[in-house]
Image (cartoon, helix red, strand yellow):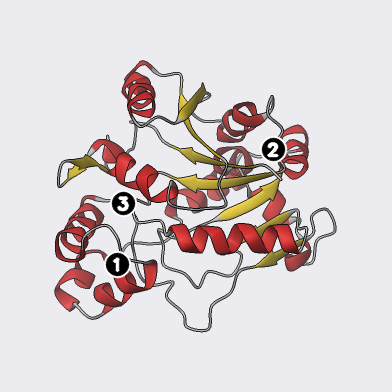
Amino acid sequence: MKVVVVTQARSGSTRLPNKVLLKIEGKTLLQIHIDRIKQATQVDDIFIATTTEIEDDIIANLAEGLEVKYHRGSENDVLDRFYKTVKDIKPDFIVRLTSDCPLIDPQLLDEVIIKAKEEDLDYYANIIKELYPDGQDIEVFKFSALEKAWRETNLKSDREHVTPYIRNNSSYLGGTMFKSNNHGLEQNYNHVRLTVDEPQDFEVIKKIIEDLDLDKDWKTYADYYLNNPEIKVLNDKITRNEGYQKSIDQDKNN
């Protein structure tokens, strides 16, 4: 079964412009992200899905330098961009990641992919019930599920965030369209931020990498975050999934 990772990356960001191009110890956040994905054993191919905007020429150039493939598509209809990245390949499973998560854990990535295969699920993720740190979000879904979402939904929040249509119609949440399950965790780490949305987030990730390097698992990073109040306080008031909530609010107002 062919498994393709598609990670979203663009230069534009209202809260922290050019965030994936910021560097820590000489590496862009995008390179750190891609280097960690490459360590996963269950991934057959990696694509960066970026936009056709001229400022994202640099993302395309970085993709070539990192020796991964890329596709350029709509800036706002990310579902369309995502679908067109893989429509000619039709992989069995697609893994959705976002490039503002530089410390994505390759072992966790493998765990989620393996489980999706074993249970033959349309959708398997560790975010239906959010117990993992923000920045370790992994969604695995069949190409058929992606294609169905692409064809059927017109909601802005669905199209801007790729997977809500699949997730909200999944069996785990009582739906009937998509057979699904959640990759759980005994302890709740959902208040830990290992992502980069705001300037404060970047300072947190920079400090963690400088102190622990780039070869640790997600739990080591998360425990370090929790055990260092001077790091945690930098970004512990930032709301998780703020962008998705804004899209939902816009749907309600239209």
Using the numbered discs, state the Cα–Cα distance from disc 3 to disc 2 in whole angstroms: 29 Å
Badge 2 element: loop
From the viewer's perspective, tell me whether residue 199 is left or right of residue 65: left
Outermost residue, right side = 176
Residue 100 shows in the view: no
Using the numbered discs, state the Cα–Cα distance from disc 1 to disc 2 in whole angstroms: 39 Å
- Which image quadrant for residue 123? bottom right
User: Can you tell which mark lies on residue 196?
Assistant: 3
Badge 1 element: loop
User: Can you tell which mark lies on residue 91?
Assistant: 2
Badge 3 element: loop
**x 59%, y 33%: residue:** 82
**x 28%, y 44%: residue:** 29
Disc 3 residue crowd, few under 14, some 14–19, many 20+, Cα 10 Å: many
Outermost residue, top side = 54
Disc 2 residue crowd, few under 14, some 14–19, many 20+, Cα 10 Å: some
Looking at the image, is mark 3 or mark 1 earlier in the sequence? 3
- Which image quadrant for residue 209? bottom left
In the rendered image, residue 245, in percent from the top left (x then y), is placed at 50, 53
User: 236 and 44: which one is in front?
Assistant: 44
Quadrant of the rendering where the N terminus is positioned: top right
Looking at the image, is mark 1 or mark 2 earlier in the sequence? 2
In the rendered image, residue 253, in percent from the top left (x then y), is placed at 58, 44
From the viewer's perspective, tell me whether residue 24 is left or right of residue 136: left
Looking at the image, is mark 3 or mark 2 earlier in the sequence? 2
**x 69%, y 37%: residue:** 91
Residue wearing tag 1: 237
Q: Amino acid at mark 1?
A: Lys
Residue 161 shows in the view: yes
